[in-house]
Amino acid sequence: MKIRTFILGVALATLAQVSFGQITGTPHDMSSHLWNTGTTNKLCGTCHTPHNSMTISQAPLWSHDTTTSSYTMYTSAVSSTFNATPGTRPDGNSKLCLSCHDGTVALNDFIGAQAPVSGTLGTEYPGTTTLIGTNLSNDHPISFTYDATLATTDGGLYNPVTTLSGLSSGGHIDDDMLYNHKMQCASCHNPHNNTYTKFQRMSNNASQLCLKCHNK
Ligand code: HEC
Ligand code: HEC
Ligand code: HEC
Ligand code: HEC
């Protein structure tokens, strides 16, 4: 009986944790911005809408206008030791992050029926410290395939298919940190959880995030 009560307690505590959410109060909680007052879906709505969302690849029910900028990518021209081949522009969820963080699309530019200011041109942009811009040649490379072949070619990377990520029970880097086998912003960041500050996926104390993939 006691054990049952205990188990129930644990289950309720877990539920409570989930339902209170992790975005509230973080820099991605834009619910108190002036343009967001008077809307209902104000916490998630800045990025997701339940209906009429954008249908672009790897953009889950996306409500925010996406960027159409051209970018300078991190390539082997930037660093001769860079072995991977990135595309000509960011793809996947990196495109979503850059829709606010490259500074070309306002925070409050939305599509989708349930979005705060659907169809209205916004005027608010991220502050200078969080502005990544369109020159990505000075940022950690993204939007390229990280697989066993790359790990072998590079010589200083763990095999993503066989190396545990530590983020889920039994999950590997490829399962938990890559998207269609690609490195993206969300490989290192979780836009929903600021436990480790700067929306990092895990603590980077003693560079442990970097050492997850880099065998240095
Ligand atoms: C600042 C933008 C932003 C906000 C606010 C936001 N999300 Fe997300 N969300 C993203 C991005 C970017 C992705 C894709 C990358 C990823 O999976 O982490 C995503 C992915 C997801 C996914 C699919 C992947 C997964 O983690 O299961 C779900 C479900 C989701 N979000 C739910 C929510 C809910 C519910 C809220 C509100 C409580 C919310 N999001 C608020 C940016 C946001
Ligand atoms: C809807 C716009 C929007 C989207 C989409 C978005 N962000 Fe942000 N992000 C913000 C705003 C606003 C801030 C607060 C700081 C500011 O205003 O400059 C912020 C802050 C941050 C910070 C700094 C947090 C801190 O503790 O200082 C990081 C890191 C970040 N975002 C990463 C991401 C990543 C990675 C993605 C995609 C997975 C993403 N963001 C998607 C709007 C956005
Ligand atoms: C290889 C891992 C990695 C990738 C990929 C990555 N970041 Fe980061 N990012 C970090 C780390 C680690 C920090 C925290 C640095 C610190 O606290 O000194 C950070 C910090 C940030 C900040 C906060 C800057 C500040 O000074 O407040 C923003 C915004 C950000 N990243 C956005 C992005 C976006 C957008 C992308 C994709 C284009 C991206 N990041 C890709 C690891 C990464
Ligand atoms: C999820 C895996 C992953 C994480 C986490 C990660 N990296 Fe990387 N990083 C890579 C891959 C894959 C490459 C591409 C290597 C190549 O192709 O030469 C790369 C490239 C680099 C490069 C450029 C190498 C070159 O030859 O030009 C540097 C420097 C680097 N990472 C440093 C870091 C640092 C510092 C961190 C922590 C803040 C970090 N990385 C976190 C996977 C990761």
Image (spheres, grey):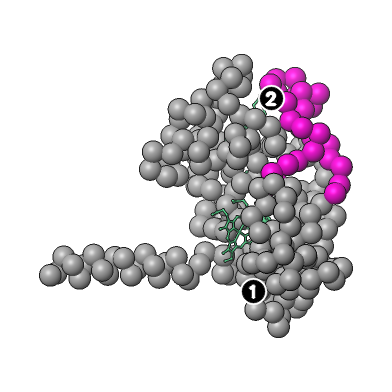
Residue type marked 1: Asn
Q: Quadrant of residue 83?
A: top right
The local secondary structure at tag 1 comes to loop
Check residue 82 for magenta coloring.
yes
* Image quadrant in which the N terminus is located: bottom left
Pair 1/2: label in front: 1
Question: Image height check: is 111 above or below 117?
Answer: above
Q: Which residue is mark 2?
A: 84
Residue 176 on image: x %, y %: 51, 41
The local secondary structure at tag 2 comes to loop
Q: Quadrant of ligand 2?
A: bottom right
Q: Which residue is mark 1?
A: 41
Residue 120 is left or right of residue 36, and the answer is: right
The answer to whether residue 130 is seen in the rendering is no
Question: Image height check: is 148 above or below 176?
Answer: above
Residue 113 is left or right of residue 172, and the answer is: right
Question: Image height check: is 211 above or below 194?
Answer: above
Residue 46 on image: x %, y %: 69, 66
Instruction: Give the magenta range.
Output: 68-94
